[in-house]
């Protein structure tokens, strides 16, 4: 029933190009939000151990009644659990909370260079992958230097790098690096947490297509080839953010979006972020 196109990962598996993110959704609200999203047609859900809502997310997945194999569930290893053995334990805890037998994608949440443990951590992800408990593995917030080292010292090229990415922060160099290495770019805060939606250029493109600013920004992500995981707990916006397949941005729109990049990072800088270290 879902109309969301898929992207093929470097291991041949498919990932929906549009998913539903649940950062900052309280555990007790996550069940309804996730069930609403799945009932609306989303098939991909993005959570993380640190979000504290894996239990609610898992309940939402179960409540949706959609067969597990039709869903794509991502969770992430928190910084404090980096290290080989601690990662295996943290993964067990995440699966338990989610109430699942496997996840579709398991990510290292941040590189945490100050701890210098992401290579050992990733080796634990490779074991989890080999055991079939994460169909795909990858990273989040990794910079090219982290990816180079990881690929030099481990065997499985990350399927995905989930990074901050929105029209005001387009990360062209990092995306080009991903493209060279067959790593899918997944955009977090794809709507710039709502902050960039009032930009006149975005409003004009939205007006031209009879769409909302959020819809044309998500369309830009899709046409640029990213995976995007917008978040909302408002049912009408959950539906609105999925209703982005009945129109296309043209070359003028894409050029106007390209001109919006002003290197405006709204989240933490992965080179120095050390929470939980
Ligand atoms: P987002 O860009 O998805 O923005 C969400 C906010 O935009 C909402 O809270 C709401 O205020 C607004 N919004 C949503 N839909 C709207 C609409 N249709 N019209 C107007 N406003 C709308 O930001 P996000 O939640 O930070 O990111 C999305 C997901 O990315 C998260 O839920 C999480 O899953 C993931 N994420 C990952 C990391 C990471 O480090 N890997 C960091 C941040 C977020």
Image (cartoon, rainbow, N blue to C red):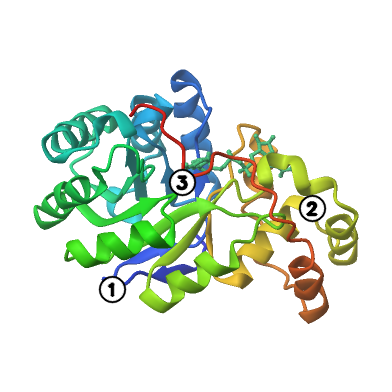
Label 3 to label 1, Cα distance in Å? 31 Å
Q: Which residue is mark 1?
A: 12
SS for dot 1: loop
Give whichever of discs 3 and 2 has the lower sequence position. 2
Q: Which residue is mark 3?
A: 271
Label 2 to label 1, Cα distance in Å? 33 Å
Q: Which mark is residue 213?
A: 2
Q: Judge left or right: residue 177 versus residue 156.
A: right
In the displayed structure, 114 sits above or below 74; it is above
Give whichever of discs 3 and 1 has the lower sequence position. 1
Q: Which mark is residue 61?
A: none
Residue 177, horizontal then vertical, whole percent: 45, 71
Q: Residue at x 31, y 55 (%)?
A: 138
Residue 244 visible in the snapshot? no
In the image, which is nearer the foreground, mark 3 or mark 2? 3
- Label 3 close to label 2 by CB (< 8 Å): no
Q: Sort mark 2 into few (<14), some (14-19) or many (20+) by Cα contacts within 10 Å.
A: many
Q: Residue at x 77, y 81 (%)?
A: 251
Q: Quadrant of residue 263?
A: bottom right
In the image, which is nearer the foreground, mark 3 or mark 1? 3
Q: Nearer the viewer, residue 170 or 198?
A: 170
- Label 2 close to label 1 by CB (< 8 Å): no
Q: Is mark 2 within 8 Å of ligand 1?
A: yes
């Amino acid at each position: 029933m879902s109309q969301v196109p898929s992207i093929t990962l470097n291991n041949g598996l498919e990932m929906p190009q549009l998913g539903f993110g649940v950062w900052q959704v309280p555990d007790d609200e996550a069940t309804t939000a996730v069930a609403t999203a799945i009932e609306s047609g989303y098939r991909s859900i993005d959570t993380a151990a640190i979000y504290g809502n894996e239990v609610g997310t898992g309940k939402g997945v179960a409540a949706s009644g959609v067969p597990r194999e039709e869903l794509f569930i991502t969770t992430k290893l928190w910084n404090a659990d980096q290290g080989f053995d601690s990662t295996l334990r943290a993964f067990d805890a995440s699966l338990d909370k989610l109430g699942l037998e496997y996840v579709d994608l398991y990510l290292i949440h941040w590189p945490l260079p100050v701890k210098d443990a992401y290579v050992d951590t990733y080796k634990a992800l490779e074991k989890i992958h080999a055991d079939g408990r994460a169909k795909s593995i990858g990273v989040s917030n990794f910079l090219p230097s982290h990816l180079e080292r990881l690929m030099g010292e481990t065997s499985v090229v990350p399927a995905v790098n989930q990074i901050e990415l929105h029209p005001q922060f387009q990360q062209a160099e990092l995306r080009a690096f991903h493209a060279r290495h067959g790593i899918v770019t997944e955009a977090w805060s794809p709507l710039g947490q709502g902050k960039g939606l009032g930009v006149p250029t975005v409003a004009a493109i939205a007006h031209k297509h009879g769409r909302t600013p959020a819809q044309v920004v998500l369309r830009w992500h899709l046409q640029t080839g990213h995976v995007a995981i917008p978040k909302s707990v408002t049912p009408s916006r959950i539906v609105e953010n999925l209703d982005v397949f009945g129109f296309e941005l043209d070359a003028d729109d894409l050029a106007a979006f390209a001109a919006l990049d002003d290197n405006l990072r709204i989240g933490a800088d992965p080179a120095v972020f050390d929470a939980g270290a």
